[in-house]
Amino acid sequence: MTRHASPGVQSLSDESAENTSQMPAITIIQPLDQPLGTRRLLSDLQSALGEPAFTRFQMASAFAKSGPLLRLYAALKSWRGTGKVAEAVFGVDHRGTSHEALEVALELFDSVYYTHEPFITFHPKMYLFDGAAAARCFVGSNNLTVGGTETNFEMTLCIDLKLPDEQPTFAQFQSCWTNLLPAVCPATKKLDKAALAKLLADGTLPTEASMRRPAGPPKGKGMGGSATRSGLPVKPPSHLPPGMLKGPAKGAKKGPKLPAAPAGSPVLAPTGVAAQGFAIQIRPHHNGEIFLSVTAALQNPAFFGWPFKGKTVPKKKGNPAYPQLDPDPRVNITVWKGRCPGAVAVELCAQHCLLRSQKRDQDHSLTACRVRAGLFCHGNAEEHGPIDRLRGCDPPAR
């Protein structure tokens, strides 16, 4: 059987025969790579920003939050400090991009643009690097969010090209980005501080605090629709670099000063057990709140991210604020009533905040620590009821 190519379209066999020496090197970030931590786009971007061969970085993302930009902060500062160029186009549809993300982007990029057209959605995701002799293109489903660059099921093609030999191929990728600029696309505008303020004021851009899901059990199907975990060993996202967590607003009242770790306090050594959560013996507060033990935090500050940089918002005006993680984590907790009065074992799962015990099912507010990789046991939780494999994770990101 004779195979015919469409007019004007070169067949794959002909193209391969003519350009065998110029085939680009392609690797794939597969859907399971990010959840399992095998390979993540964030790490690939950090690596590319550190390569001397590249001198220009151009990206576009439908949605963005500050998390990835804060994790790339030092790399992008160093990149631009050596005279290299960084430019970005962001979508602002469906309140999926935060004010904080674009605020940080204005600091880190030479030029920042945003694209918005009523009734249609800006949805591309691409991250392009090039220099005199090489180019690297990441094209796929990854938004510039913690989920998109680290933990979500995503698929990304990474294409490495040799320049100038493969310049025609790279030019096709680059035109996808340059065609979004205002000179070609009237839906795109240059972002500056005045435009950023307007986008916040008119409700186009939400703050990240307003984007967090309210506490409570999930309703319906879909994302967060079930608290039952599959057993997939999801690796948590990377930690923010030191100093990247924002403290309370200027002029905010200081909460009570917490004690320093007493001299000689035991620091728990890693157990070597693979886990993504912790077990802790607790006594619930009279109003249903559960507070992290200060002793536990002081014994293992690295695990809990101590000292906390955020502050609680008092329910009653005039009450002091207390330290907490920022952003405030949301988790599932399952409580097994213990044999000792008031003693319970807690399983931290994901997605929402629900307290269950043998006596009652009732929603409670939760002040909890961040769940990180590793196993932490405080007190004698194993003596107070059945504890299955403990799991936990940060709130899912888009």
Image: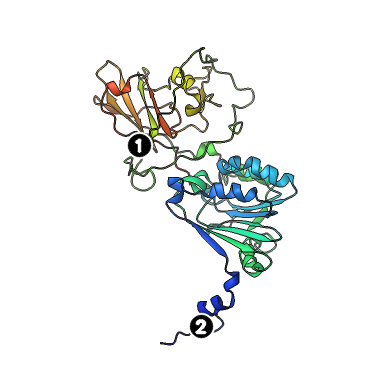
**Numbered badge on residue 6:** 2
What crowding class fits label 2: few (fewer than 14 Cα within 10 Å), some (14-19), or many (20 or more)?
few
Query: For this view, does 51 lie left or right of residue 317?
Result: right
Quarter of the figure that contains the N terminus: bottom left
Q: What residue appears at the point 57 percent right and 73 percent down from the top-left corner?
A: 20
Q: Where's residue 248, x and y in %? A: 59, 26
- Element on which disc 2 rests: loop
Q: Nearer the viewer, mark 1 or mark 2?
A: 2
Label 1 vs label 2: CA separation? Answer: 55 Å
Q: Is residue 24 visible?
A: yes
Q: Where's residue 352, x and y in %? A: 39, 36
* Picture layout, residue 9 above or below residue 68: below
* Picture layout, residue 70 above or below residue 260: below
The image's colouring method is rainbow
Nearest to N terminus: mark 1 or mark 2:
2
What crowding class fits label 1: few (fewer than 14 Cα within 10 Å), some (14-19), or many (20 or more)?
some
Q: Where's residue 79, x and y in %? A: 69, 46
- The residue identified by callout 1 is 217
Amino acid type assigned to the residue bearing label 2 in the image: Ser
Q: Where's residue 160, x and y in %? A: 59, 61
